[in-house]
Each structure stands twice: as structure tokens, then as C-alpha cells.
Amino acid sequence: MTDAAQTLDGWYSLHDFRTVDWITWKMIPAEERQEIIQEFLGLVEKWNKTQTDKQGSHALYTIVGQKADFMMMILRPTMEELNEIETEFNKSRLAEFTLPAHSYVSVVELSNYLPAGEDPYQNPQILARLYPELPKAKYVCFYPMDKRRQGADNWYMLPMEDRRNMMRSHSMIGRQYAGKVKQIITGSVGFDDYEWGVTLFADDVLQFKKLVYEMRFDEVSARYGEFGSFFVGTLLEEDRIPAFLNV
Ligand code: VOV
């Protein structure tokens, strides 16, 4: 067996995608819609408080295309909290007017391919990456991915040194996007259908395409990357929620 990569694990993550049932939403009185929006804003207010207390973070984005209408990305210290939040949303009145479109369960992950120093859990830069406050970037891009295990191209059979070299090259490309794209890699082996979730944040949506395309030419993605569905969305700030739901 080759050496397994060691991981540092941070907050648990839920990407929850919903489609709005606009037809039934339009059928109820405007007053009732306002109440439902207020109830949802109350939930978001609770999440804001958790974020201020540094006990988690969240982000809301409206999704472009037919895969979903909006996404709630939630980070929390435990899986139980994610489950509670999801259930609380499901019991809210807004949920009666949404259909589940997709979800992804994972945990913020850093791997030891690049040296992190002595006790990484004491390193403030590492802690900031494991327990991040999600940025208010204008755009989000989410997709799940695997590393290939097929015939001669089996990532998990490669010696540590080869994987480390390839990850170094990967990070060199990534670093050219510093300040343009922020990545949060979440591990999902044992939690969801792929091995990682990739969540990218940017203020210029085109940078997602440029970064993901450039990485396709890099060996770790070219030879070993397998990708699921891509979701792209625009920031749904709280003050935009009533307008988004206005019919
Ligand atoms: C935005 C830029 C960017 C930067 C700087 C960056 C850097 C780094 C570093 C330094 C490391 C290793 C240590 C760690 O921090 O974990 C990683 C790790 C990882 N990455 Fe990455 N990545 C980026 C971006 C970035 C993208 C766009 C993708 C998707 C790939 C693509 O083809 O679509 C990706 C994937 C991953 C994955 C799946 C892992 C875990 C691999 C494993 O086997 O464990 N990543 N990544």
C-alpha cells in the first residue's frame, strides 16, 4: 500500500440546492408571501449570529440555469448542526414552495501534500482555512470531483512522492489566481457520491472558466480528474431576498 495522504478537517459542509415552485408561490396572497419571506429572513438572521460568533458560516447564491434556483451553503462544527439546519428549513413555510434539487455533504479539508509546519492546528493561517468565513464574492461555482482509479491511471496506487509533485504543480497554477478566485476544498469520501466538493468564489465569473480550463491541462486534472455537475450562481445578499422572491 502507498502512504495515504493525511488530512486536516475543519467545519462540516452542506450545499443545499432548491428549486422554487413559482406556480404555487404565485397562488398565495401577497401578504402571506411577505410573512413567509420574513420567516426565512429570521432563519438567516440566526445563521448571521452563528457566523458573528465564529461558530460557522453560510452563503446564499441564486443558481443560473435549470439545475436549481438557489443554493444555501452552510458550514458548522458538527454534522448534527447541518442536519438540524436542513430540518429547520424543511419545516419552514418557504420550504413548502421549494423542491429539493441537489445536495452535497462534506467537510472542509486540507491535505498534507504541501508542508504545513509543526502543529497545523496551532497555525492561524491553517485555522482560517479550516474554519473559513465564506466570502461575499459576487459569484460561486460548485462541482464535485473524484481522482481516477482506472487501469494504469490510479491516483490511489501512486507513490506519495509522485502525488506530492503533481499537487505542487496544481497549487502553482492555483496560486496565479490568488486574489481572483478563492477555493474551498471539502472532502466527501464516505459522505457523498464523489470524493471532494470544489467551491470557488470570485468577483469576475469568467475567472472560474479560466482557472478550471487551465487546470485541465495540468496532469493531476488531465489524467486523474473526474468531474460531476457544475453549478454557477450569483450572490444572494439578504437585502436581495425579497426582490428575488417577489412575484
Ligand atoms: C484557486 C486556486 C487553487 C489553489 C491555490 C489550490 C491549491 C491547492 C493545494 C496547495 C492543495 C494541497 C494542500 C491542500 O490545501 O489541501 C490542493 C488540494 C486540492 N485541490 Fe486545489 N487549489 C486551487 C483550485 C482548485 C481547483 C479549481 C480544483 C478543482 C480541480 C479542477 O481541475 O477543476 C482543486 C481541487 C483540489 C483537490 C481535489 C484537492 C485535494 C487533493 C487531494 O488528493 O487531497 N483545487 N489545492
Image (cartoon, helix red, strand yellow):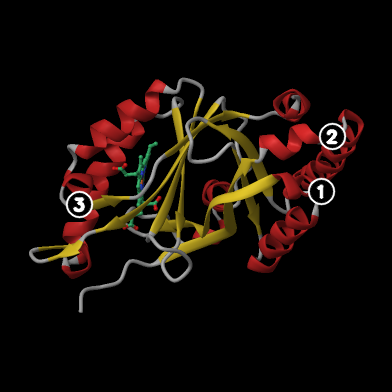
User: Which of the 4 image quarters holds residue 147?
Assistant: bottom left
Ligand 1 within 8 angstroms of badge 2 C-beta: no
Is residue 119 visible to us here? no
Q: Quadrant of the C terminus?
A: top right
16 vs 219, nearest the viewer: 16
Q: Looking at the picture, how far across and down is residue 127, in whole percent?
A: 57, 52
Image point (80%, 52%), residue name: 92
Which mark is first along the chain, 1 or 3? 1
Query: Would residue 129 be visible to someone looking at this image?
Result: yes
Say the numbered circle drawn on residue 93.
1
Query: Disc 3 designates what residue?
Result: 165
The residue pinned by badge 2 equals 33
125 horizontally vs 39: left or right: left
Q: Residue at the spot x=77%, y=45% of the render?
A: 94
Q: Amino acid at mark 3?
A: Asn
Could you tell me which secondary element the residue under label 2 belongs to?
helix
The amino acid pointed to by label 2 is Arg
Label 3 with label 1: CB-CB less than 8 Å:
no
SS for callout 1: loop
Q: Residue at x 75, y 49 (%)?
A: 96
